[in-house]
Image: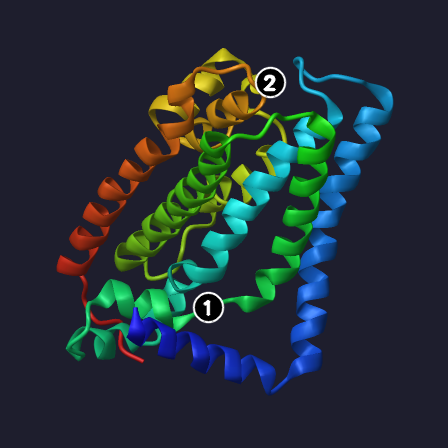
Amino acid sequence: MKLYGKYFMIHLKSIMEYKTSFLFSCMGQFLVSFNVFLGIYFMFRRFSHVEGFTYSEVLLCYGITLLEFSLAEAFARGFDTFSSIVSQGEFDRILVRPRNEIFQVLASRIELSRMGRMLQAVVLFVYGIRKSGIHWTYPKAAAVVLMLFGGAMVFSGFFVIYASICFFTIEGLEFMNIFTDGAREYGKYPVNIYGKRVLQLCTFVVPYALIQYYPLLYLLGRGKPYYALLPLAACLFLIPCLMLWKIGVRHYVSAGS
């Protein structure tokens, strides 16, 4: 952690050299996500409920999902841009260094400009909490922390899959955005509104429901107590992701520079 802290400070100092650019980048991230919020707002001007969820409850759901994705994108961005590391031959240098390659890729890119998106997520989350009438307890507060942690791990896992594919294709495959950016967009609503089959898929195959839908039901007083622990189960998704990464490393052939 001490070494990662040094990497973090290097990125921070680099960004602060261009404060105006950093500020505008944060504003851009805020405004891009704001368009999604407007879509939710105008839809609820027409309908008062969506599958039993109110406007404030949907904003709470979206705020959590957006914050989960933003945390993963900010701190696991190195995997999302891994195709350039492979194509430019930089991974060769990573392999000859004494530190673990996963740590080096993880620390190679920290996108602090995602703070703009995080700020919007926090605003939506706080508004949703205040308007949803949730009776807060320590277990519910812990459930929120687990949701954020589990969600960041799941989205980071998809970034690792994206990076692992680059070992075989050199360039990244854009269809992976379905599982990252697409999940962020569709995550603005509880997963169950997309149908039973999608809910099953997002429970047993791609664990989005474990970090969003089921813990949300617990927060709103509609779910069972063990729903609060499901984000921890979602973290197991990292195991096959890291296994695929190890396979990719073993089959890596230098791409040159």
Any part of residue 75 in sight:
yes
Q: In which quadrant will I find the N terminus?
A: bottom left
Amino acid at circle 2: Ile
Residue matched to label 2: 193
Q: How busy is the neighbourhood of tag 2: few (under 14 within 10 Å), some, or many (20 plus)?
A: few
> Which residue shows up at 18% across the image and 79% down it?
97
Numbered tag placed on residue 255 in the rendering: none
Residue closest to the far front: 137
Amino acid at circle 1: Ile
Query: Of 199 and 226, which appears nearest the observer?
Result: 226
- Say whether residue 202 is left or right of residue 28: left
Q: Position of residue 64 (x, y in %)?
A: 57, 40
Judge whether 201 appears above or below 237 on screen: above
Judge whether 33 appears above or below 233 on screen: below
Q: How busy is the neighbourhood of tag 1: few (under 14 within 10 Å), some, or many (20 plus)?
A: many
Quarter occupied by residue 18: bottom right
For the residues labelled 2 and 1, the Cα–Cα distance comes to 34 Å
Determine the secondary structure under disc 2.
helix
Q: Position of residue 12 (x, y in %)?
A: 51, 78
